[in-house]
Image: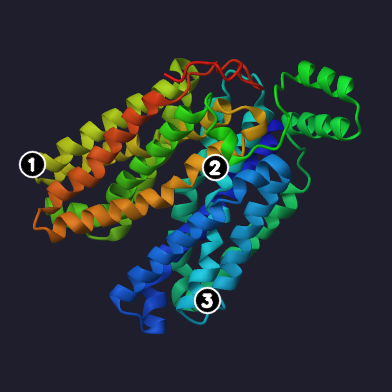
Amino acid sequence: MIRRVSLVCFLAWVFSVFDHTLFGTLLPQIAADFGWSSAESTAVATWVTAGTFVVSLAVGPMLDRLGRKPSLMITTAGAALTSGFSAITGGKFSMILVRSFSGLGYSEEVVNSVYLNEVYGRNGKRGFMYSFVQSGWPVGAMLGAALTAAFLPLIGWRGVFLFATFPAIVIVLLARRLPESPVFVNLRHIRKLRREGRVSDADEVAAAAGIDDERAGTVRDVFAPGLRMHTISLSLAWLLNWMAIQVFSVLGTTVLTEGKGVSFDSALLVLILANAAGFTGYLFHGYLGDRVGRRNTIIIGWLIGGVVMTVMLFGPDSSGFVIPLYALGLFFLTGPYAALLFYMGESFPAHVRGIGPNTAHIMGPIGAIVGSAVLTVLIGAGLSMTIAAFCAGSLGLIGSGIAMLGTRKVDQNTAGELPSLTTTTS
């Protein structure tokens, strides 16, 4: 059963990423078709990111109220419908509106982290198991690039979007056959007992399941005294780290060519390098997290990544120096997400296990916007690309590691509830 659940979640994430990254890949073709200028394309992309943030807000409450399995189906279906409707958009407004719903696909990884955390139980290798699921990001990005290269000349950008719809629909159908997580089954049963006035029975089930609070959580709950510092620190870590992702991953080609004078024969080389480093990084950090602690793994990985990227930026401009360090930096930038997503599922009580991680997760698009803005402002002020990338990227990466010091220490050996919320947050 665990293998089946893991496989479906992996495929759901692959095709959610496929849809999420497809817009950026196809944007030049879309802009040429609609006659958009570079400024107009950038504005559309920015508004899409803002819309993604708004739609992503719904996923946390969905997880805690509807359940983990329905949320998996809804987010994956959201990615499928977003791809399908993107194929029939007619201009800026409709494109922004439709692509905003890619926030459902973007948030599918939060659903995976919560659902699998509760399904895997006390398995000592569960972090490493989850890292294979999380590695769906580079797989989905590579799949999107490959299929775009193969089919764009034949069916155009609208056809590529339409093609992306059907695999995701298949995943939704497969997800229907999955079980609900045991933790949410208990939450739902306790809530039902309390509605029926069977308080003593509800208390008995809650005690047996280790559930302290079965209420459907709210944003106020994750900013309550026991969780406030943890939520703020985690949200800040996501924002700062996505500044680094925007600079070094999304805009990595620009940084390398303009900042380091590196010339690649093909942009595909950069894409392959980035995703290969990300894939191996996920597996390494997932494995390490099971052994030294996921929180420690995240902090150490991001701090090392910040140092590596700094050395890459200020070191020699030769390709033999820059490219290996760039790959190593990506390894420590993206790899810790395998530990991070699973850690988030462990670090919040069951009744806010959806809304808590999602509150931090939605700061990713905001961080991407901030990263681009800081880079643009610094270059506009006359600073070099090297200095601008250091300030917006390296410092953001190091800052995200430091921000994680404010998050909660949790016992990875417990699969269900955390201790009471008086646990220290340092």
What's the CA distance linking mark 1 and mark 2? 40 Å
**Figure coloring:** rainbow
The reply to whether callout 3 and callout 1 are in contact (CB within 8 Å) is no
Residue nearest the observer in this picture, 389 or 381: 381
Q: Earlier in the sequence, mark 2 or mark 3?
A: 3
The residue depicted at 52 percent of the width and 27 percent of the height is 227
Q: Residues within 10 Å of mark 2 (few under 14, many from 20)?
A: many
**Foreground pick, 8 / 367:** 367
Three-letter code, disc 1 = Pro
Which residue is depicted at the point 61% across and 20% down?
Answer: 418
Which residue is labeled 2 in the image? Answer: 358
Image point (68%, 53%), residue name: 74
Q: Which mark is residue 94?
A: 3
Amino acid at circle 3? Ser
Of 259 and 195, the residue lying toward us = 195
Residue 396 is left or right of residue 88, and the answer is left
Give the label on residue 316, or none. Answer: 1
Q: CA distance from mark 3 to mark 1?
A: 46 Å
Position of the N terminus by quadrant: top right
Residue 146 appears in view: no
Q: Is residue 409 left or right of residue 75?
A: left
